[in-house]
Image (tube, coloured by chain):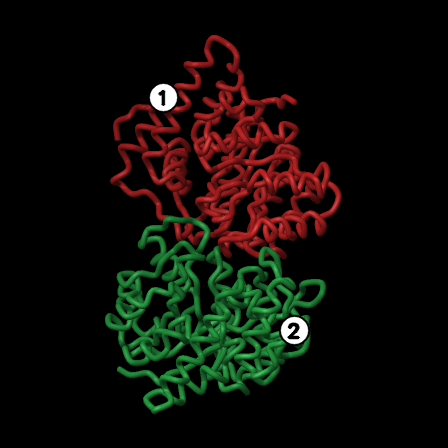
Chain colours: A red, B green
Amino acid sequence: MTHTPRLFVPLITPFAQDLSVDVPRLQAVAQRMLDDGADGLAPFGTTSEATSMSVEERIMALEALVEAGIDPGCLIPGTGCAALPDTIRLTRHAVSLGARGTLTLPPFFYKPLSEEGVFAAYARVIEAVGPGLRLFLYHIPQMSGVPITVELIGRLMDAFPGVVAGLKDSSGNWDNTAAIIAAFPEIETYSASEALLVRNVAAGGAGCISASANINAHGIAALIRGLGTPDEAALLADAAAIRGLCEKLPLIPGVKAIVARRMKDDAYARVRPPLVAVGQDHSVAVAAVAARSYGESASV
Amino acid sequence: MTHTPRLFVPLITPFAQDLSVDVPRLQAVAQRMLDDGADGLAPFGTTSEATSMSVEERIMALEALVEAGIDPGCLIPGTGCAALPDTIRLTRHAVSLGARGTLTLPPFFYKPLSEEGVFAAYARVIEAVGPGLRLFLYHIPQMSGVPITVELIGRLMDAFPGVVAGLKDSSGNWDNTAAIIAAFPEIETYSASEALLVRNVAAGGAGCISASANINAHGIAALIRGLGTPDEAALLADAAAIRGLCEKLPLIPGVKAIVARRMKDDAYARVRPPLVAVGQDHSVAVAAVAARSYGESASV
């Protein structure tokens, strides 16, 4: 099975001075990503600091995106929490809004977990939410401590046919991504870095959901359009180089600082504890990415 | 400074058949622990599956303990969540009820975190909650991924004099506990195992907050009464042996299964996903602990 290659942006969440969710800036940056050529948004994931937000804030913020005119059919919001009732509530809400699917972390406090326990947690969510759920599993073991194994995916697909729609592999381990695509070509498997995009699509994957898309959606969208053309290698090299520059910064605060620079609005750089905003010592690195991505002067 | 040695029970949370919080059984087991000789309760911690509960459930359940007649002055509820607004809400609520303090996890999704980020997270909670907070820091790096270092404790104590009241060290690393007690003798430092109780108290610590207290509060209370008496060694050996038997089981489901056996009520054994209840294959081990702790027949 082949999938149309797509870019979903795991949208940053802007915060106001009192650290509440900054709805107008959230709506603005969301629209900017779509204008830049993203196929959709995956808000309220790791890059979004979603686990630092309350359930009520996440519900309000998702509704604000839809109220801003963004088609829910292009949204794959994160809904996975440590507590099952929270995950169920958020997932049900996203389905009720008509989201394309939900990108759902496993419960992430207890570790190590048995496959049985992770299966039971996802099963409860699927049963509680009912029809309409398209579940994207979120494999980010370096944060969650809870890997989504090939065995677990298979078990969920067998038990709940048609519910598992895809997976995001944030492990950075290409061999793992390749094994999942090979085992389950019918689901949409996304890489977490545009540097893996060409390999992902060639193997039968569905594209990428990448933190650095927040600052290079236009470049990644161009790469997707250029797949299979003579421009592919150059577009990939360019996108991978920008990604590489981002990775020299603390990724999430770094991405927010670059967005702030692009939007000429320092407010976008704010993070919630426990993350820490990048300081002046990173300004050269921030400027370097902005220069490469937006063509602005690298001087600071 | 010396502290009166104390036992706080990190209370299990019973769940009903639909996995909602089973309030009558929660109240019953809480009272049983106090009747058994515990000095207080530390509900809604790791053993309580608190990170698997919503904020609303935790608020309701804490109120139910107080409504059952339990003195809030002997309660140190867990209040730490991944999301800062949730931690603030729970901590404020516990203070408003007159709790002895709160046992507060650091935010536990992002890792590794900078000390600056962990400090900022606790600082926000302290500032938001205001007067009356007695904060017990919760060091359980194998679950949270976020260690509470000596440097962090010192920084919080300097910045917020009188707020840090203690710490629970669940690392199992005695050298770490000893270093914290030596550096901060004025705060109450608890070990997470009764096997370390004699060492903890001799070094100037405050006692223990131990999962296995759920099934041996009477034995640990007897050990505390026997500290410095000729019975100390035998009481410690007995409590440590029971703890050792518990550790042969998956700890939290195992403890719940033993409580269920004691209460002659299988409902106490239920866990919420992602934990998995112990099955028949563990019944011999469960019976062995019950026999040792409650003196019942080991036959199953």
At horizontal 55% and vertical 64% (from top left) the residue drawn is: B49
Q: Amino acid at mark 2?
A: Val
Q: Is residue A128 left or right of residue A260?
A: right
Tell me what residue is drawn at x 38 percent, y 61 percent. B122
Residue B252 drawn at (x, y percent): 54, 65
Judge the density around disc 1: few (<14), some (14-19), many (≥20) Cα neighbours within 10 Å: few
Q: What's the residue type where badge 1 is placed?
A: Gly
**Quadrant the N terminus of chain B occupies:** bottom left
For disc 2, the chain is B
Q: In this rendering, does residue B95 appear at all?
A: no
In the image, residue B70 above or below residue A40: below
Label 2 crowding class (10 Å Cα cut-off): few <14, some 14-19, many 20+?
Answer: few
Q: Which residue is mark 1?
A: A295
Distance Cα–Cα, label 2 vs label 1: 74 Å
Say whether residue B278 is left or right of residue B91. Answer: right
* Among the 4 quarters of the image, the one containing residue B200: bottom left
Q: Residue at x 38, y 42 (%)?
A: A253
> Which residue does the image show at 68% across and 70% down from the upper left?
B267
Q: Residue furthest top?
A: A230
Quarter of the view holding residue B69: bottom right
| Helix, strand or loop for disc 1 | loop
Q: Where is mark 2, residue-wise?
A: B300
- Position above or below: B66 against A283: below
